[in-house]
Structure formats: structure tokens, C-alpha cells
Image (spheres, rainbow, N blue to C red):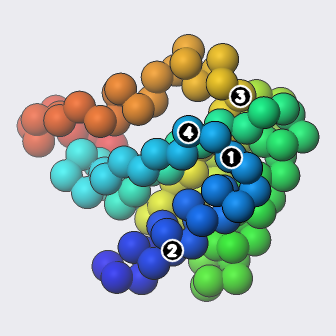
Amino acid sequence: MERILDLKHIVIKTLDINKAEDIISIDLKDKSSMADYMIIASGTSSRHIQSLSEQVLQKLKDNGIKESKIEGKDSSEWKLVDGIDLIVHIFHPEKRKFYELEKMWSELIPKEKLII
């Protein structure tokens, strides 16, 4: 578990150094079995979003998550970097506001309603 916390900090630092905006981390341990953490950030343009996703992917691979990958390669407004136990969403600010993942995943979900 300490390894995933270290990795979370590395990813957040990478996003911050590369000028991602509004970076947040959501603990998913009691909400979903799909991952331990979700990190959400915004990029300023399609190139910035692409660059951020590639930087995060490289950091994950450098830290032993070789099977990590980028989803949404054809999208200019959103990328998901799947780091197995760590999921990173990088949005254009308007898309981020539209999907409101922070609101959805920050709320407590009763265990009997957990599907994922």
C-alpha cells in the first residue's frame, strides 16, 4: 500500500511540475474495487493534455507499472491514464465541469450499491 501512495505523490508532482491545473486526489478504497486512487487534473489545451498524459504514463512505467496505458487517444479534451491501482483523468476544463467526476466519486457510496 505504501508503494501506491508513493506513486500517487510522484504522479501529482509530475502533473504539478508540468503545469496541470486543479489537481485533486480521491481515495477510492471504500468506494470501488477498480483502483485505490483517482487523480483528476486539467490541461490548458489539447497538446497540454496529451503531454501531461504521456508524462504520467512514463512515470508509471518508470516506477514498475509496465502495463499502464492511455485511454482516449483520439480525444482532444480528455485522457485517462490507467495505472492499475491509480487512475488519472486529465480534462479540458469545460469537459471536467461537464462530467463532475469529483462530485460523483467524492460522495460516500453505500457498500451494498458498489458495482464496480
Point 84% across, 43% down: residue: 48
Point 35% across, 60% down: residue: 36
Relative to 71, does residue 59 appear above or below in the rendering? below
Give the percent coordinates (x, y) of residue 31. 24, 45
Picture disc at residue 22 = 4
Mark toward the viewer: 2 or 4? 4
Disc 4 and disc 1 in contact, CB within 8 angstroms: yes
Mark toward the viewer: 3 or 4? 4
Give the percent coordinates (x, y) of residue 61. 69, 77
Front-most of residues 85 and 52: 52
Label 1 residue SS: loop
Residue for badge 1: 20
Q: Is residue 113 visible?
A: yes
Residue for badge 2: 7
Q: Residues within 10 Å of mark 1 (few under 14, many from 20)?
A: many
Residue for badge 3: 92
Does label 3 or label 1 sit earlier along the sequence?
A: 1
Label 2 residue SS: helix
> What amino acid is labelled 2 in the image?
Leu
Q: Residues within 10 Å of mark 2 (few under 14, many from 20)?
A: many
